[in-house]
Amino acid sequence: MLLVVGHVLDRAAPAVGVTAAAVTLVLAIAAAFTRPAGSAPLLAGLRAEVGVDGLSAVMVVTVAVVLVAVLIFAAGEFAAEESRARFHGLMLVFAAAMLVTVTARDLVVLLMAWEVMGACSYALIGFWWREDHHVDSGGIAFLTTRSADLGLYLAAGAAYAGGVPGLTLAELPGAAGGWRDAITAGLVLAALGKSAQLPFSFWLSRAMDGPSPVSALLHSATMVAAGAYLLIRVEPLLAVTGWAAGTVAWAGVLTALILGAVAVVQRDLKQVLAASTCSQIGFMVLASGAGGAAAGTAQLVAHAATKSLLFLGAGAWLVALDTKDLARLRGAARRYPLLGTVFTIGALALAGVPPLSIWVTKDAVLAAALADSPALYVVGLAAALVSGAYVGRILAVLWAPADNMSNPRLNAALLVPLPILAAAAALLGIGGVPVLSQRFAELVGGEMPEPGWAELVASGLLAIGGVAGAAAWTRSRSLVPRAGLLGDWLGLERLAHAGVAVPAARLAEGLARFDDRVVDGGVRGAAATGAALARLADVRVELSLEAAVRAVAGGTRSLGRLARRPQTGQLHHYYAQAAVALGVLALLLIFL
C-alpha cells in the first residue's frame, strides 16, 4: 500500500510501517510456537510449499525483531520531506521476501523470494537516486549478487533433471548422479555471492551508500544472512557431496580472516562495519561447512542483534555529526555517553569478548572447525584476533578525549531500539550454557559443539588482547593509517570490472557488430538481391508481357473502329451488307 499510494502517505508512513512490523513480530512469535505449513499448486507437477520448522522459527523471529528496531530508528532519521512511504514500503517488502526465503521448502519458492529480495536491495541502496554515485552503488551491488544468483537457476534445473521430488530442499541429497554436484555448486555460488564472501565481498562496501537503516537490516538479519542461512539449511547436501563441505569451510574462514584485516584499516565507520560483516558471516559459512549447523545458526542470531545495533549507532552519529569519517568521530562516544555505551557493548560483543554473546557462539563454531580440521581452527583463531583489532581501533577513536564542541540533540526515536539490541547482544550468550545450547541444537536440528574451557579461555584472551593492543596502537597515533590495498577492499571491484565487466562489454559490442554486419547484413543483402531480381524481371519479362498486352489492346481498338464503320443507320446499306455476306457464304459452300 505504501509503495502504490506513494507521497500521499509520507506523513503516516512511519506509523504504518512500524505497526506492520510489530504485527509481523507477533505473528512470527506465534508461528515459532505453532509451526504452520502450507502449499498450493504452482506448476504442473510442482507445488509451492512453505512451512516453519525449528530453524525457520529462529529466523522469522530474528528477522521480525530487527525489522521493528530498524523501522523505529528510521522514523526518527528521515525528514518529513523525504519519500518516507517509498522507503518504508520497500523495507517491508524486503523483509517479507526474507521471511519467505527462510520458510520456503522448495527451490522454486526460494528462488522467487531470493529475486524479490535482490530487487528491493537495489532500490534501497540507491534510495537517494538523485545522486549518481548512490545509483551506481546500487547497480554494482545488484549486478554482483545477480551474477552469483544464476547459481540458483543452475541448482533448480539440475534438481529437476536429477529427479528431486517437487524440488524440495530436504530431498536434494538424493538427487541422481552428477546432478547432485551441479545442485551443490549452484547453491554454493548463490550463497557466497549473497553473503558477500570472497571474491564477491566488494559489493557490500558499495551497499554502504544506502541509508543507515538499510545497512542495519541488510547486514544483520536479511540479505547478507540469507546466504549463510541457505548453506546451513542444505548442510546435509554439503556433507554428502564430499567436496562441497571443505570448499565452503575454507571460503568462510579465509573471508573471516582477510576481510577482518580489511576492516582494520578502513577510515569510514560504516566501511569498518561492512567489512566486519563479511568477516562475521564467514564464521557462519565455516560452521555450515564444518558440520556445525546449530553453531552457525547461533552465530547468525547473535550477529543479527549485534550488527543491527552497531549500524544504527553509526547512523545516529551520522545524523548528529554529519560524518562517518573516523578521524572526525574522535571523542563521539564521550559527547553522547548513552549512545557510546550501547555502541561499546555491541562492539565488544562483535570482538568476541567474554562473556558477551558472540564469544560463546564463535567458540561453538571454532569447536566444530577443530573437530573437522585443526588448520581451520587455527585460521579461525587468527580471524578472532583480527576481530578484536578492528573493534579496539574503533573504540579508541570514539572514546578519545574530545574538544569542547556543541552536541546536537538526537531524536529520541533514534535511541529507543538501541538499549534493547545492546541487551540482546550481551545476553544471547547464555545460549551457550550446556543445557540451553543442547535445547537450541534440538530446536534447529543438529548438535551444538561444546568447546572446552581451554578453548573458551584462549579465544577470550585473544579477543581481549586484540582489542587492547589495537586500542593502544591507535591512541599512540593521531592519524588513521594509510589504507593501501586492504583499504581498497583488496581491489576486488577493480578486478571484477577488468576481469568480468569489461570483457562482457567487449563481447556484447562484438556480438552487436556481428549482428549488424553479418546477421543484419545478410538480411539486407537478401533484400537487395530480391530487389535486383525484381528489377531484372521488370525489364526482361514484365516489359515484354506489357507490350503484348498493349498490342492486343491496340488491335482490339482497331477492330472496334473498323466495326463501327458499317454501322451507318441506313437500311439499304444493311441490305447491301447482307447480300455481300450471303454471296461470300455461297462461295464458301461451293468451293469447300
Image (spheres, rainbow, N blue to C red):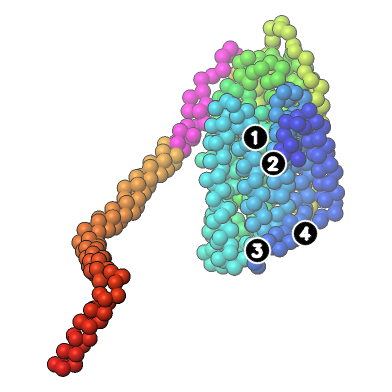
Q: Nearer the viewer, residue 314 or 211?
A: 211
Tally of numbered discs: 4
- Tell me which amino acid carries mark 2: Phe
Q: Where is residue 331 in the image (x, y as percent from the top left)?
A: 69, 14
**Residue picked out by circle 2:** 94
Secondary structure of the residue carrying numbered label 2: helix
Residue 579, located in which quarter of the rendered image? Answer: bottom left
Task: Evaluate if marks 4 and 2 touch, with contact meaning CB atoms under 8 Å apart.
Answer: no
Tell which residue pokes out farthest to the front in this image. Answer: 572
Helix, strand or loop at disc 3?
strand
Q: Could you say which is closer to the camera, residue 219 or residue 562?
A: 562
Residue 153 placement (x, y as % from top left): 56, 55
Quickly name the residue at label 1: 124
Q: Are marks 1 and 3 in contact (CB under 8 Å)?
A: no
Quick one: label 2 or label 3, which is nearer the N terminus? 3
Q: Which callout, 4 or 3, points to the residue nearer the camera? A: 3
In the image, taking residue 571 as reference, residue 44 lies left or right, namely right
The part of the chain drawn in magenta is: 475-497
Q: Type of residue at label 1?
A: Leu
* Residue 43: assigned label: 3
- Residue shown at 75% from the left, 13% from the top: 408
Q: Between disc 4 and disc 3, whose residue precedes?
A: 4
Residue denoted by label 4:
38
| SS under mark 1 | helix
Q: Distance between the residues labelled 1 and 3?
A: 32 Å
Residue furthest toward the left?
591
User: Label 4: few (<14), some or many (≥20) within 10 Å?
Assistant: few
Is residue 104 shown to the viewer in this render?
A: yes
- As drawn, is 460 to the left or to the right of 148? right
